[in-house]
Amino acid sequence: MDALLGGIQILLSWQVLVALLIGSIGGVIIGAIPGVGAAVAIAILLPATFSFEPIVGLTMLLGIYGSSMYGGSIPAILLNTPGTPVNALTTYDGYPMTKRGQAHRALSLAYSASFFGGVFAVICLIILAPVLAMIAPHFGSREIFLAALLGIILVILAHRGQIMAAGMMAFLGIFLNTVGLEPAKYTHRFTFGQNWLTGGVDLIVLVLGLFAISQALFLMVEKDEMPKAERVQGNMLGGFVELLGLKRVASVAGSFGVMMGTIPGVGEFTAQFLSYTYAQKTSKTPEAFGDGSPEGLVSSEAANNAVPAAAMIPLLALGIPGEALTAMMLSVFYVHNVIPGPQLFQGSMDFVMALYIAMLLLNIIVLVFLLFSTNLLLRITQIPTRYLGLMILLLSFVGVYSLRNSPVDCAMATGFGVFGLILKRLNLPIVPIILGVVLGGIMEVKLRSAMARVDSPIDFVNRPISAILVSLILIVLVQHVRALRFEHRQRRLKKQMEGDKPPKDEGVAPEGF
């Protein structure tokens, strides 16, 4: 209770409240513009947040992170164009409802389900906070190293169909983290005699290049798109009443969001898939899914909005980001010398509770804003994409140059931007690079620290938590190999069945020949 009251006291600062308001409303606006997304906005704002107090900068970024998916549902439902990649599943049932003249109903359901998922996740976190405070101190260097290793394995395996590419990108990120001065003996690594590489590859330069500049270049080379949608008319509060009849679907979806959010590298897409599949299998009208099912819309939106709050668990408790956005937030901690991990839960529990309460407040702010501004946001979606690209490019270079007033940083960011554009064109994953840089740095530091107290590899599993983590790593790898073998057998069986079929009408002339 003392931590909760301390967290409320921290949030009563006007700077924190203004930052939360700007982040929440700004995140909705950014999410409503197709082709931008929270990653681009957070990347651009990162350099500015370094001059704020940690709680001020983090609440602003949290506001963008947690609210962008609210805004992303608007073009997904009205235009069949997801505002953020996470809202892709929303188009399955949201847009068919719009075509039937039920746009206000679809938006109302999306808003109410998103609000439920976000609040549900925050309440779960507040309840779990004392448990995390007890468990976190038991994580030493070995455990955090193994947790980071598990995280990077899960990030790679989460890219089904692109595992080899994701692995290469993750290891590229780990390599980029090694460039510069080695942290223990300050020897030069991979600098090749170039002084400008001595400082290494700055995470913010990399993030702005791969996410913001690459997206700006992508938008600038594409054709201008100005989608149009009809004004939405109707009661936006009706979705809350309808949600009462779908509370089982919403609760299960929120639970999936919380569970998947706590696992590094899994995130919104897996939570959505599991909740959508569950809702369809347990529905009385499964045939309606994909054709305007309210259950499908609720399961998708409740799950994806529960993930941001849950994703803060590994970040705050262990200092391990689960995806790119929390990896960016980690840099704000480091700049202000606030190290997330077991010590944060032990000595700054009121700070943790302040972040949780901020996430609760952002859901309320966003909901109130959306109930009165949906039609206004429709005008924002009509901004030509090339203007957006030019604006993002200018803001990105301002952000990069403001870090150290260095033209070299601008050149490096441009190079990473072009590289990111190539990856987008080839449909290759970018997120593993960022997580490789962040998790690779954590793994190196913690492994060095652990090796001072390790005499043999057995010492890595001689404690309960480390043994559990090693077991999880082995289980994940074995299950993945089994899944690959099963898919290989299925493909071989399918080919055999196709090979056994006799050719159709072989040697018979068609009628009328």
Image (tube, rainbow, N blue to C red):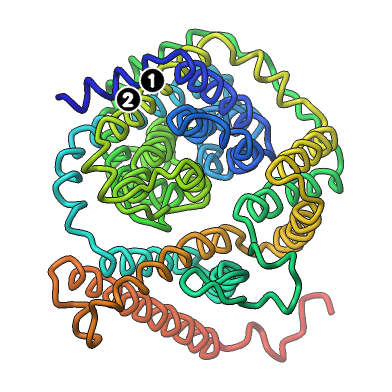
Position of 404 compared to 189: left or right? right
What x and y, as percent, mark residue 64? 53, 31
Residue at which label 1 appears: 361
Distance of mark 1 from mark 2, alpha carbons? 6 Å
In the displayed structure, 324 sits above or below 246; it is below
Residue 120 at what x, y percent from top left? Answer: 28, 30
Q: Quadrant of the C terminus?
A: bottom right
Residues tagged 1 and 2 counted as in contact (Cβ below 8 A): yes
Front residue of 66 and 271: 66
Question: Residue at left 14%, top 47%?
Answer: 134
Q: Which residue is mark 2?
A: 357
Residue 116's spot in the image, x, y percent? Answer: 34, 26
| Type of amino acid at the residue the image marks with label 1 | Leu
Local packing at callout 2 (Cα closer than 10 Å; few below 14, some 14-19, many 20+) is some
Q: Amino acid at mark 2?
A: Ile
Give the quarter of the image for residue 452: bottom left
